[in-house]
Amino acid sequence: MLASPLKLFALRLAEAARAETMTRWSAGIEAEDKAAAGREFDPVTEADREAERALRRLIEAEYPDHGISGEEFPDRAAQGRLGWSLDPIDGTRSFICGMPTWVTLIALLEDGAPIIGVIDAPRLDELYLGDCDTTILMAGGTERRLSTSGCRRLPEARFSTTDPFLFEGAEAEALAALRSRVRTTRYGHDGYGYARVAAGTIDLVVESRLSSYDLNALVPVVRGAGGVIGDWSGGGDFSAGQVVAAATPELFEEAVALLARAAA
């Protein structure tokens, strides 16, 4: 799988981000609030900014015609069909609280569609690399190909979402209905939850209010392991930030149908 120069470059980007985030993780963590006055706390750290700067420098040096879209700095337009989506720390709240499941998200897009995705969990030394056909986990100096759990029914599903308080109104009602149907629920894992869908230990993730840089890397990783990822209507329009990732088509369809009924 690693024969592609662009996949190898994605791994170099992840390594560069680790150099910035792990050093600052060890040295201590201070956060600023980048939210507008009166809005929900939205933390950003020096690690977020310096990691994204490092990734941008590498891309600009090696692929100057590629576009760049990231969380912390303005977009750079592509001069061709390819561009990079960057989220240097997905789970900054976990990062500043000393939790280990924050991740770096890196995706290569072709004509706006993600074709390579990296979910890197530096503190856990786990890197997930997917290309929509295959996903591998690199950890502890070894590599193994991943596949989803095969779970097909909500009553058997292990479900995760980052924060139930991010859902409001009909979305909150839909989440409550879903949570009442699944076997078990875990909170707080941000992008790492999707990595565990690919690894087969989580069966279903449902979220809302995601930005493009939050989700682009997730798509190739989940699909490469045999999973399904789409919007709450069962399609592929993520513009509303609504995402469903499931181990199988059957589980995806059951979750989407329940969400639609509950939110109606």
Image: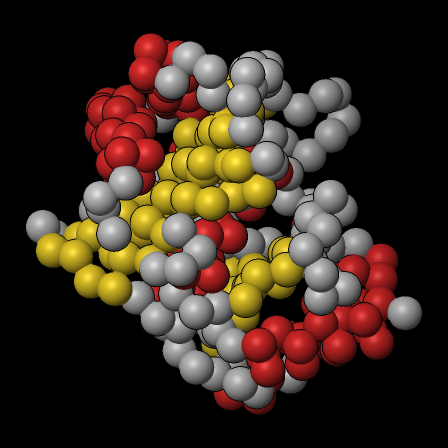
The structure residue drawn at horizontal position 53% and vertical position 36%, both measured from the top left corner, is 110
The structure residue drawn at horizontal position 39% and vertical position 65%, both measured from the top left corner, is 225
Horizontal side of residue 172 vs 160, given as left or right: right
Find residue 48 and report its horizontal and vertical position in percent: 43, 24
The structure residue drawn at horizontal position 51% and vertical position 52%, both measured from the top left corner, is 219
The residue sitting at the front extreme is: 80
> Would residue 14 be visible to someone looking at this image?
no
Find residue 169 and report its horizontal and vertical position in percent: 85, 58
Find residue 89 and report its horizontal and vertical position in percent: 43, 33
Query: What is the count of numbered marks?
Result: 0
- Front in this rendered view, residue 163 or 61: 61
The structure residue drawn at horizontal position 79% and vertical position 54%, both measured from the top left corner, is 168
Q: Is residue 158 above or below residue 119?
A: below
Q: What's the colour scheme? A: secondary structure
Image quadrant occupied by the C terminus = bottom right
Find residue 166 and report its horizontal and vertical position in percent: 68, 50
